[in-house]
Amino acid sequence: MRAHSGHIRFDRSVTWKKLLPAFRPMFTKFLEESGQLPQDPEILGVLIEENLRDLRNNRKPEGYNREGPMRLIFPISKNLDFYVYSKTKTTEVTRVVEQLSRVLQKYRLKHAVDWDKLTVFQDRK
């Protein structure tokens, strides 16, 4: 399946703090699978620590919103959710989101996955 974006919506029982144990493996998996893993381990450590600091305070993390083939975005909203976004419609988004979903399942974080829910990319009928 080809998609511009894959959305992961967490169950009401999940809080940002509960995402803390799963975040490092999930974030690293995103960077590995999207081919954006920094060469310098210090850069990776800083990226992860910035996000973990927010999660420890039960706040929405920054994610990975840098120029590249894909982005991991935690949108500004009251909902506990995030999405993986690519400028082009590709099967890679589907593959990466499914990998992230498996990581979340491993940590028993209830969630649902939706595709192409960004208004700007919804297919017109």
Image (spheres, rainbow, N blue to C red):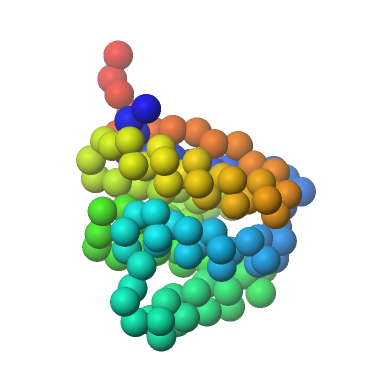
Q: Is residue 119 visible?
A: no
Q: Residue at x 53, y 66 (%)?
A: 61
Assign the N terminus to one quadrant of the image. Answer: top left
Assign the C terminus to one quadrant of the image. Answer: top left
List x then y, in percent, for residue 45.
47, 81
Q: Is residue 61 left or right of residue 119?
A: right
Q: Is residue 45 above or below residue 65?
A: below
List x then y, in percent, for residue 43.
38, 81
Q: Residue furthest right?
A: 13
Q: Residue at x 40, y 61 (%)?
A: 31
List x then y, in percent, for residue 24.
56, 68
Quadrant of res 117: top left
Q: Is residue 91 visible?
A: yes
Q: Is residue 116 left or right of residue 16?
A: left
Q: Is residue 72 left or right of residue 90?
A: right
Q: Residue at x 50, y 74 (%)?
A: 48
List x then y, in percent, for residue 7.
48, 41
